[in-house]
Image (cartoon, rainbow, N blue to C red):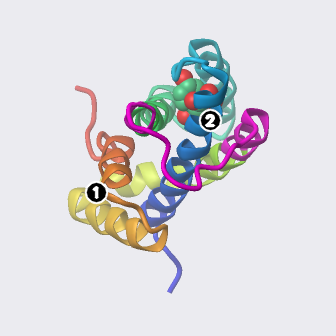
Amino acid sequence: QTPSALERLADLSAQRLRLADQVAASKRRSGRPVEDAAREREQLERLGQAAVARGLPHEAATGFFRAQFEANKLVQYRLLGEPPRRGEAAADLDAVRARLDRLNGELLDALGQGLNDAARADCATQARRARERAARRRRLDELHRIALSRALGDLCRRAP
Ligand SMILES: O=C(O)C(=O)C[C@]1(C(=O)O)C=C[C@@H](O)C=C1
């Protein structure tokens, strides 16, 4: 059974959130702040253009990626507010960002169909199922599950 677009979005988003642990580890070492506004702007610029080139609505696409960043920061702030977990990997930020970029591209691939599915009446139910499945598959703990809710939280909602 091929996964639905919402399942695909949830799974990629979950993978992105797992990488937040490595970003946080690198920031613990470097002392850099969690938020990097310039990096967010740069990603939004690129992703917004790529979305429009595929015929996706700019606002919905950038809104979706903004939510990905917010969710990622949520995980990082929580991890950095605690002592390092055992076996915390000392990751290279550039390498992790390259993986985030790749996931962004894959999210973009799934986003068109995902937005279509999200416009349906059963979005909330489908999104919850997709989140739960992704959480199990990617072994998310409570923190990362909350963050996944943040990452996908506005998907079923439309600006007036
Ligand atoms: O690249 C970083 O430094 C991250 O923390 C990751 C990320 C993201 O989710 O892409 C999240 C927060 C930052 O403000 C910028 C980007």
Position in image of residue 61 (x %, y %): 50, 34
Q: Residue type at mark 1?
A: Arg
Figure check: 152 above or below 80? below
Disc marking residue 74: none
84 in magenta: yes
Q: Quadrant of ligand 1?
A: top right
Q: Mark 1 or mark 2, which is nearer the start of the sequence?
A: 2
Span colored in magenta: 77-101
Side (left or right) of 25 relative to 118: right
> Split into 4 quadrants, where in the image is the C terminus?
top left
The response on whether ligand 1 sits within 8 Å of label 1 is no
Pick the front one: 136 or 82: 82
Q: CA distance from mark 2 to mark 1?
A: 21 Å
Q: Residue type at mark 2?
A: Ala
**Residue lying farthest to the bottom in this orientation:** 1
Q: Residue at x 44, y 66 (%)?
A: 7
> Is residue 47 among what the camera can see?
yes
Q: Crowdedness of circle 2 by 10 Å Cα count: few (<14), some, many (20+)?
A: many
Figure check: 4 above or below 97? below
Q: Quadrant of residue 159?
A: top left
> Is residue 112 among what the camera can see?
no
Q: Residue at x 72, y 34 (%)?
A: 93
Q: Which residue is mark 1?
A: 120
Q: Which residue is mark 2?
A: 51
The response on whether ligand 1 sits within 8 Å of label 2 is no
38 in magenta: no
At mark 1, the secondary structure is: loop
Position in image of residue 106 (x %, y %): 65, 52
